[in-house]
Amino acid sequence: MGLTQSPPYEKQPLYIAGQRHQLQSTFTTVNPANNEPLAEVSQADPSAIDAAVEAGQRAFPSWSITSPLERSRILLRAVHLLRARNDDLARIETHDTGKPFSETSTVDVVTGADVLQFYANLIAAGGLDGDTTPLRPDAYISTTKAPLGVCAGIGAWNYPIQIALWKSAPCLAAGNCMVYKPSEFTPLHALQLAEIYTEAGLPPGVFNVVHGAGDVGARLTSHPSIAKVSFTGQVSTGSKVASAAAAGMKAVTMELGGKSPCVILPDAAVELAVDGAMMANFFSSGQVCTNGTRVFVPQSLLPAFQTRLLQKMSDIRPGDLMDPNTNFGPLVSKPHWEKVTAYIRHGIETDKATLLYGGLGAPSPLPPACRKEGYWVRPTVFTDCTDDMLIATEEIFGPVMTILPYDDSHPAYLTTLIARANATPMGLAAGVFTADLALAHQVVGALEAGITWVNTWGESPAEMPVGGWKKSGLGVENGRRGLEAWVRHKSTLVEMARGGSGTVFAKL
């Protein structure tokens, strides 16, 4: 199916207590490749949000005491369904996000299912077990892990189904229930995931879906019966969500934005460095929170780096998003297109950075399947950038690379370079490219970021805990540590000897 033939998606309902719930009030989601409507989506009102939370409360007592092994069986059945329907789900993601099918079919659903499988296997293998500590011959301490209750998951638009699974997998595995709100820009995955969970055997009310904009997320965040909020999005919104959650003493996980440094050291192989920088800037049309948009390149390597980069920019192929050769799509929405375009214009006109490639306008020529009404931008590279330029300090969240040269001729260059790389209030990700692994570990150890890579960029497997430092987030997702974010601990001191603490007073 060509992208211009967008399928007529049915009206998207809420999903509460295992059933679809249609509401009169709706909003429209559009195809970012051609700006054509995709579906009408039910807009949750306060009573619907309350109903979703109440459904979770009703389901929690039973689900929370379901054995980890039985919960694992249900979640693994959902993994099987996700993998069996990978391509159908990927097509939905492509229509909704504007990402090429070559990406959504190999990354988005696959990696989300990987995380669900990881946590299903982890709890089956004792991942929720407590421990026992001998205190003295007649006393010991036991610790147990208990689920939190009904939790809110607030998704993002750039990896809709992946992020929904990153949140729901550990939440449900730990015995919690969830009310999930997808981004209003990319809502089409939510019903599919909810019904897959139900088909797999998840009891009604354990996973519920409400649709809407920020007001829906705000009501969830402040709801007195919500025990935890897991949010993925920009720093400014995350700060508000965290503040609202803190007022209710709710647990939070915040995966926010970044302005991450991609550090090329003088001994790095040019080909590897260019490939890494391109992955760190143009994958998913630059709409990745961990993107390494500040590319630090040594003066000694700069000519070779830029020459090879320009040669390889033709490897970025915009086009019909269902064409397997296409690897670059439009931005997700008109507001985001306006934002990214404004940054590119600012880089040219105000920052006066050197435009090495790209610039304003859509890629040219666009194939017939891609209409100019879509939210297309050109992959763009600025060079000779300085640390104080707006394009080098603010998160653009689009396909815009800034090359920041540094002087590597003096012996103490590394200290200055690391200080520049860390000179940002955000600390989500960072990476280094070098042939010297000892030096790589030294640099990574000094970079102020929660996610780091050496000689690669972007991979976040299920086994890898990921989370930001500074203003880029709170807590971690994925890995063994990710499960701990969805439980509370209880410690019990057991006195086995007769008398116990009462003997102290008996002797007085």
Image: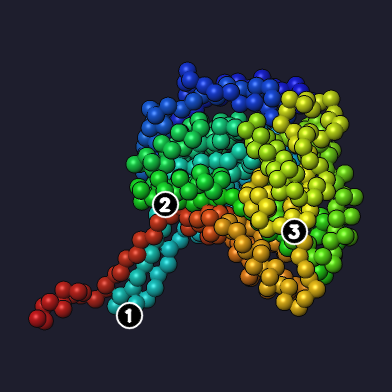
Residue under label 3: 404
Residue at the limit of the structure toward the left, as seen here: 508
Amino acid type for the residue under numbered disc 3: Leu
Dot 2: what SS? strand
Q: Residue at x 85, y 58 (%)?
A: 305
Residue under label 2: 251
Identify the mark nearer the N-term, 3 or 1.
1
Asked if residue 26 is positioned above or below residue 242 in the image, the reply reads above
Q: Nearer the viewer, mark 3 or mark 2?
A: 3
Whether residue 465 is visible, yes or no, is no
Q: Position of residue 192 (x, y in %)?
A: 59, 32
Tell me if 480 is positioned left or right of 290 in this view.
left
Neighbourhood count class around disc 3 (C-alpha, 10 Å): few under 14, some 14–19, many 20 upward: many
Residue under label 1: 136
Amino acid type for the residue under numbered disc 2: Ala
Q: Residue at x 56, y 57 (%)?
A: 425
Identify the mark nearer the N-term, 1 or 2.
1
Label 3, label 2: how far apart the Cα atoms are: 39 Å
Tell me if 345 is positioned left or right of 307 in this view.
left
Q: Residue at x 43, y 55 (%)?
A: 487
Dot 3: what SS? strand
Neighbourhood count class around disc 2 (C-alpha, 10 Å): few under 14, some 14–19, many 20 upward: many
Tell me if 500 is positioned left or right of 426 in this view.
left
Q: Position of residue 50 (x, y in %)?
A: 38, 32
Label 3, label 1: how far apart the Cα atoms are: 60 Å
